[in-house]
Image: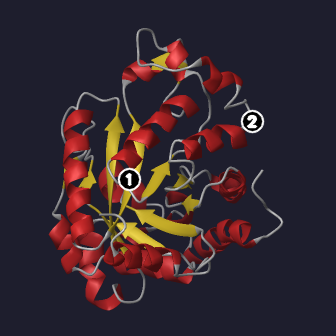
Amino acid sequence: MTGTPQVMRSIQALYGNGRLANTGYMSILPVDQGIEHSAGASFAPNPIYFDGDKIVELAMEGGCNAVASTFGVLGSVARKYAHKIPFIVKINHNELMTLPNKFDQVMFGTVESAWDMGAVAVGATIYFGSEESTRQITEVAQAFQYAHELGMATILWCYLRNPGFKVDGKDYHTAADLTGQANHLGVTIQADIIKQKLPESNGGYNAIKNYGKTHKKVYSDLTTDHPIDLCRYQVANCYMGRIGLINSGGASSGASARAEAVKTAVINKRAGGQGLISGRKAFQRPMKEGVQLLNAIQDVYLDKAVTIA
């Protein structure tokens, strides 16, 4: 279904908007943290973003290809903005109200509701490696199929989550070999774009006892310790880049946020990726500074001197 003219038109709408229009790269503003991390924790640093109108305004002023957010945020301003910037509706979330906190992505609305509000695409998260992952894979695969039937594009947040991925004090949730396999599962259920955290390590399969399968050439031939090579292995698991990989800009980190975001963009681009998705770094600061940060990311993809390594 991903190759239908309606879906291709939706994908083109994503790649054809903003400062990176028709370059083959994309810059997306994601703001679903009000559910994933609580509204207070997300928006207290800059309370104007409690208002969905300001979220979309930041995406537009920042020259983004699209804005990704919740049913509530985008639905509240759809009549004003859905025809001005591509909407990506995040259809599932993990919420932190349950006591004790649990980590499970559950559906917050329907694909048809996203289509009704004029969305170009739907996005979803799967916690690969978690006890709930089998159910999440099934739910998201079915949702993505229906989205394609309606002509929408699909974006998958491919995250790992399991306490067993931490071994001897080292966290392998962002290991290249494990995140690469998560990407490979994601493209298998017909995600048109994969969103993944930038790899920070490798060798997860070797560190976790009696888990999964790998091959020695993954580490001797296909990867090195260089961050571009680690990211390139993520791209390879997206059908050698046939499905676009966008990396996340990470959490807000004060004065170094801009430098970190630009570095991530350079790594993604040089590894063969297709863009960056950056939220908290942009919206947890004054709008003018958020726009400048988004533009700095985009400048990497507009700079012809930054080439594939």
Q: In the picture provided, is 166 more to the left or to the right than 294? A: left
Residue 12 visible = yes
User: Whole-percent x and y of residue 260?
Assistant: 68, 52
- In the rendered structure, which amino acid carries the disc numbered 1? Leu
User: Whole-percent x and y of residue 74?
Assistant: 30, 75
Above or below — where is 112 with respect to 157? below
User: Whole-percent x and y of residue 243?
Assistant: 49, 56
Residue 101 visible = no
* Numbered tag placed on residue 156 in the rendering: 1
Above or below — where is 122 with respect to 213? below
Q: Nearer the viewer, residue 264 or 46?
A: 264
Residue shown at 32% from the left, 78% from the top:
6
- In the rendered structure, which amino acid carries the disc numbered 2? His
* Numbered tag placed on residue 226 in the rendering: 2
Residue shown at 25% from the left, 79% from the top:
76
The earlier-in-sequence mark between 1 and 2 is 1
Q: Rate crowding at label 2 as few (under 14), some (14 to 19) or many (20 or more) other CA atoms within 10 Å.
A: few
User: Whole-percent x and y of residue 111?
Assistant: 19, 65
Q: In the picture provided, is 271 more to the left or to the right than 116? A: right
